[in-house]
Image (tube, grey):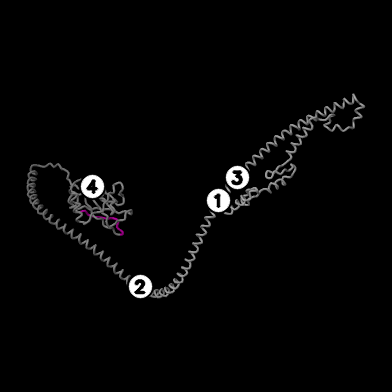
Amino acid sequence: MAADLSKASTMDETSDEPPTSAVLLDSCHFSQVIFNNVEKFYVPGRDVTCCYTLTQNIGPRGKDWVGIFPVGWKTVREYYTFIWAPLPNDTAAQQQIQFKAYYLPKDDKDYQFCYVDQDGVVRGASVPFQFKAETEDDILVVTTQGEVEEVELQNKNLRKENEELKASCASLQKQNTDLQEELKKTQELQNKLESLRSNTEKLKLELNSLEKENKDLKELDGSRKAELQQLKEQIRNVTSDKADLETKLKTALEYMEQLQSQVLNCKKEVENLSRVDHDKTEQLESLKEENRQLRSARTEEQQNLMKKLEEKKCLFQILHGKKKEVDAENQNLREENELLKRLLQSAEVSSFPGFSRARAPTPARQQGFLLFGNPYAAAGANLEAEAAGLGSLRKCPMCDEVFPKHIEASQYEAHMQSHLLECPVCSETFEKSNKQVFDDHVFCHDLE
């Protein structure tokens, strides 16, 4: 209750609440303001002087304040009383304020000074102190009876004086109460006077600002007159330019109408071209489909030709194998004929010498050097001739024309090339019998 009364009294004195916030203790900066000469005890009923030093880490502002807080406070809203911190001079870092005894705590709890800026952040805190009356140590005094009587007499006189002092004190307390009421009224008047002075200073500043603004407006008025004259001249020029532009605009509108007519004609041409392009696109798609079908047919035809070629190769290999077998058999027969020949000659020499000499020049030995001829020579010769004929021939797959084996490869390839047409774009080949397919293929390249 006393704290609430103190806050109310301080608010009446300063006519404003201090800026506070819900900033907690651990986010404050206690080393930016240092409190000096803080006593451990302050006597209740007396004014308290608070001295502090502002460091370089703080910039004082008009709404900074110094409050008395109970030890263990959590937020800056728990102050007991406060005083606005005066703004320091340019050279003075040491500051001093005085708390009036009327607004100070009346209990003996621990308190401390705290410096709070206008953002509600604590920038410095003092060591704890108490509001406690001075105490005298008890003294043991040994006196005589006479001194006791004298002391009792003095005590009697002192009691009488005490009664008188009590009466005087009551009168003084009444006077003090009246004086405090008058002091409170005086402080209120002083606060109002300070407010009026502040308002006066503000009005003076506003008056100086208005005078300066008025001076600037006068100078601006002179320049505006010159600008107005220039604008009038520009308006005359613009009027003249406007007439020229109207003439040009009329000509431009006529030209625009002509362009619009041309644009309409162009749109019609574009529509016609679009239709033609659409037709061409459809024709191209049709040609592509036909080309795809032709390619498929050509691929199938090539596959059939390759099958035929493979069959002929197989037949050639079979005949070649038979020829080798016949050649081997002929070789065996020749060796047998040689053996028979030698045996026959030796028999003729030993048994029929006269007949052998008479029959020597006969040409019958040309038949494999056998006397009565080789019975297998005719069959072997026919098979050898057939195999040699098949192995030594080349047949054109296009026109079935047959070429001997000893013909040059360039002549055979030239004959084959005469049956083909080669695409000049992709080098794909077509038979001359498919001339239409070749032309459609080349046309598709042109469309791409």
Q: Which mark is residue 297?
A: 3
**Mark 2 or mark 1, which has the lower sequence index?**
2
Q: Earlier in the sequence, mark 4 or mark 3?
A: 4
206 to the left or right of 187: right
Mark whose residue sits in front, 2 or 1: 1
Instruction: Identify the image quadrant of residue 372.
Output: top right
Task: State how far apart marks 3 and 1 are (Cα).
Answer: 16 Å
Q: Are marks 1 and 4 in contact (CB under 8 Å)?
A: no
> Which of disc 4 and disc 1 is earlier in sequence?
4
Residue 64 appears at what percent x and percent y?
27, 55
Where does label 4 land, which residue? 70
Label 3 CA crowd tier, 10 Å (few <14, some 14–19, many 20+): few
Asked which secondary structure carries label 4, the reply is strand
Viewer-closest of 59 and 403 = 403
Residue 167: percent from left, percent from top: 8, 52
**Crowd around label 4: few <14 · some 14–19 · many ≥20 (10 Å):** some
Q: Earlier in the sequence, mark 3 or mark 2?
A: 2
Query: Which of pointers 1 and 4 indicates the residue nearer the eye?
Result: 1
- Judged left or right of residue 336, residue 80 is left
Distance Cα–Cα, label 4 vs label 3: 107 Å
Residue under numbered circle 2: 224
Find the distance from the CA under tag 2 to the CA under tag 1: 80 Å
**Label 3 is placed on what type of residue?**
Ala
Type of amino acid at the residue the image marks with label 2: Arg
**Residue at the location (83% across, 32% down)?**
367
Asked if 333 appears above or below 307 in the picture, the reply is above
